[in-house]
Image (tube, grey):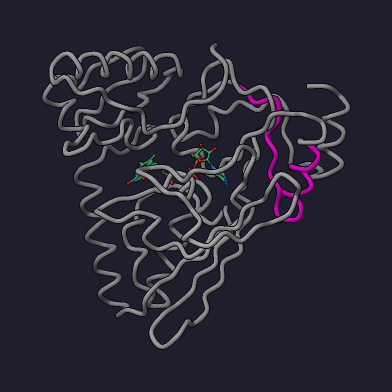
Amino acid sequence: MEEGIREGLRALVGERVLFAAPLSEYTSMGVGGAADALVFPETVAEAARVVAFLKAEGVPFIPVGNLTNLIVRDGGYRGVVLCLKGLRRLHVAGEGEDGLALTAEAGVPLSSLVAVGMEEGAAGLEFLAGIPGSVGGALRMNAGAFGREMKDIVASVSLLRFGGEVDHVPREELKFAYRRLFLAEGDVIVAGVFSLKRGERSRIRSRVEEIMTMRRERHPAGWGSAGSIFKNPPGAAAGRLIEEAGLKGLEVGGARVSEKHGNFIVNRGGARAADVLALMEIVRERVEAVTGIVLEAEVEVIGEEG
Ligand SMILES: Cc1cc2nc3c(=O)[nH]c(=O)nc-3n(C[C@H](O)[C@H](O)[C@H](O)COP(=O)(O)OP(=O)(O)OC[C@H]3O[C@@H](n4cnc5c(N)ncnc54)[C@H](O)[C@@H]3O)c2cc1C
């Protein structure tokens, strides 16, 4: 990365920029080469200044949150990884007789939303329990579980746009699909507003506990992963198809198809992105050969070949 760009970034965020940052230390899968720069803005205004600078200089960038749905290839990312974890403002206000509007910046962890739901008696966030992402990443991925998705609770999304302005886009104008919110190139989610109903705290808490128990029973723990690797094809569960194809326990390098849940690939230590991607390819081919169904990746894959 050119020295002029480095200096510009330092001038904008001080010490909150790392150069040649190994992304394997930041992705939940524990794989990935280095980003030219990894930048941590702490306010929306600061993020806007960084984005304006990168756009003016023609430097590629990608917004990220907690990097829990990302596979970064071993050659790393040429450009700036803009990590929005530092945007943490969270606000709850009454809305009508029995409603609540929760405003959360992009970096707020989903676990904080769940905690606020339990504390404030705001029903509707329980399905997010145990998903390790941030608000921005969850909106972008239309994250979901147990029959509910982000699109079911979102009232509006604030987007940092090309010109540097922030647009508050209402739900009706947002295009969601399974694990996807369609955004224009370069749009960065800086906040979301969620429409919730007042509920009984004890019921909300017991639903959260129930979900956490189900997750502990079904999902592997203790190893790096990126959650579900493949999307569920219409009318089928990817995990079940992988299990039926006899692929549980299959390994490439340090990457293994979890024995507990077929749709999880875990990093048993020392896996490279190439191992994970090679394993994904084998799984895809064998599932197609056995069932005729072509699995589509749910994880986002970025960066250069190693
Ligand atoms: C153990 C485990 C369990 C999981 N369970 C689930 C589950 O039940 N359901 C589910 O849906 N997912 C699940 N996931 C996947 C993941 O946690 C979710 O997709 C989560 O919402 C991703 O959030 P993140 O902040 O980590 O996003 P990241 O991984 O950082 O980014 C994901 C994508 O969103 C984009 N993005 C991130 N932030 C922004 C932003 N501010 N503006 C624009 N684009 C942005 C990135 O460029 C990338 O394309 C699981 C993951 C793990 C490791």
On-image quarter of the C terminus: top right
Q: Residue at x 57, y 28 (%)?
A: 23
Instruction: Identify whether 116 is placed above or below 227.
Output: below
Residue 239 vs residue 231, the one in the foreground: 231
Is residue 48 located in the magenta-colored stretch of the structure? yes
Is residue 296 located in the magenta-colored stretch of the structure? no
On-image quarter of the N terminus: top right
Residue extending furthest toward the front? 173
Q: Residue at x 36, y 56 (%)?
A: 128
Q: Which residues are magenta?
A: 34-54
**Count the marks: how many?**
0
Residue 195 vs residue 256, the one in the foreground: 195
Rendered image quadrant of residue 91? bottom right
Q: Position of residue 286 (x, y in %)?
A: 20, 14
Rendered image quadrant of residue 279? top left
Q: Position of residue 106 (x, y in %)?
A: 57, 54
Ligand 1 occupies quarter: top left
Residue 213 vs residue 283, the one in the foreground: 283
Q: Position of residue 226 (x, y in %)?
A: 39, 34
